[in-house]
């Protein structure tokens, strides 16, 4: 049986996050997860030096506890490491009403972020930890309150993730901003409005086969293919897409949400589909 979390690398990349796939992650796990109900945040309590010095332990385990010990890892430079698509031993004994008792490994995605546990979060982590959690929750169609700290799951024995500004209320506020807000500068917002207007206009044009179009209002080059719109913005090399989920290997269309609009506008460099020959 295929592991359930093989979508993680794709959705994180589509949000413009830096992603590193650990070899074998698609088949790694202590069996499978099911009925996903939340995302749990941890810190590694690892060394103070290095980008992700705890990676080997998280992947392979430690004496008395076999790896993987999380599904995802977050390095100090903000890179997301995709570790295991199956069940990881990260939660241990604990309880929260919406999940139940001692079954967090089965129903909650675990993230180990590199930190000594003394509040030494980097600026990159402060940015992308809540952002990545928001991406996961949005994919799972779960609310912000399903972002849970290890210490909230097991308050008598765990303290992680320690030292986060504003504690977990602050963390979840950051997650909520990414889920509910757009976090664009005004210049970005003006550009996106023009781009959305161009997309709406292009949808109305009666066209049959593929063709190249220049949209004068935005100064961008468009490739129209039935069922999708591909756009290469003038002066930028990145090619992104809107609409045709098959080009990105997705099972369903990707909505024009904040992240996809940001990619469409070229505000986050990313390539998720090649232009047809």
Image (cartoon, rainbow, N blue to C red):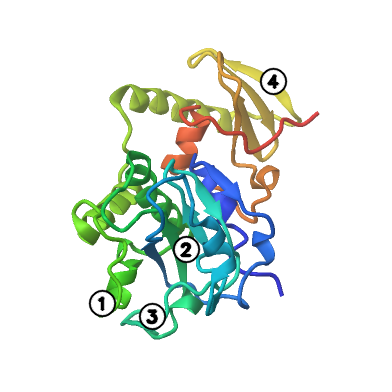
Task: Residue at the far right: name it.
Answer: 277
Write down the residue under mark 2: 140
The N terminus lies in which quarter of the figure? bottom right
Residue drawn at x 42%, y 23% as measured from the top left: 194
Q: Earlier in the sequence, mark 4 or mark 2?
A: 2
Of 207 and 161, the residue lying toward us: 161
Q: Earlier in the sequence, mark 1 or mark 3?
A: 3
- The disc label shown at residue 212, or none: 4
Q: Earlier in the sequence, mark 4 or mark 1?
A: 1
Query: Within the image, what quadrant is residue 33 found in?
Result: bottom right
- The disc label shown at residue 155, or none: 1
Residue 113 point in image, percent of width and height: 41, 55
Task: Residue at the far left: name it.
Answer: 166
Q: Is residue 213 above or below residue 208?
A: above
- Measured in 3D between alpha carbons, the distance from the residue under mark 1 to the one under mark 3, in whole angstroms, is 15 Å
Residues at marks 4 and 1 touching, judged by CB atoms closer than 8 Å: no
Residue drawn at x 63%, y 31% as measured from the top left: 230
Residue at disc 1, secondary structure: loop
């Amino acid at each position: 049986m295929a592991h359930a979390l093989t979508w993680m690398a794709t959705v994180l990349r589509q949000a413009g996050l830096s992603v590193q796939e650990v070899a074998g992650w698609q088949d790694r796990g202590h069996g499978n997860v099911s009925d996903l109900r939340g995302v749990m945040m941890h810190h590694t309590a690892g060394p103070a030096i290095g980008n992700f010095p705890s990676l080997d332990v998280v992947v392979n385990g430690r004496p008395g506890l076999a790896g993987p010990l999380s599904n995802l890892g977050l390095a100090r430079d903000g890179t997301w490491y995709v570790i295991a698509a199956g069940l990881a031993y990260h939660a241990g004994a604990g309880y929260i009403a919406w999940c139940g008792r001692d079954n967090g490994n089965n129903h909650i995605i675990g993230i180990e972020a590199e930190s000594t546990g003394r509040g030494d979060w980097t600026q990159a982590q402060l940015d992308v930890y809540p952002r990545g959690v928001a991406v996961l929750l949005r994919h799972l169609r779960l609310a912000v309150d399903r972002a849970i700290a290890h210490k909230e799951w097991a308050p008598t024995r765990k303290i992680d993730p320690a030292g986060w500004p504003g504690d977990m209320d602050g963390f979840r506020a950051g997650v909520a901003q990414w889920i509910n807000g757009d976090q664009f500068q005004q210049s970005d917002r003006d550009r996106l409005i023009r781009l959305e207007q161009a997309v709406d206009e292009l949808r109305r044009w009666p066209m049959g086969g593929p063709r190249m179009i220049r949209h004068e209002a935005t100064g961008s080059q468009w490739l129209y293919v039935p069922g999708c719109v591909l756009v290469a913005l003038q002066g930028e090399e990145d090619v992104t897409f809107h609409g045709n989920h098959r080009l990105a290997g997705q099972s369903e269309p990707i909505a024009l949400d904040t992240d996809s609009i940001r990619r469409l506008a070229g505000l986050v460099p990313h390539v998720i589909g090649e232009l047809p020959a």
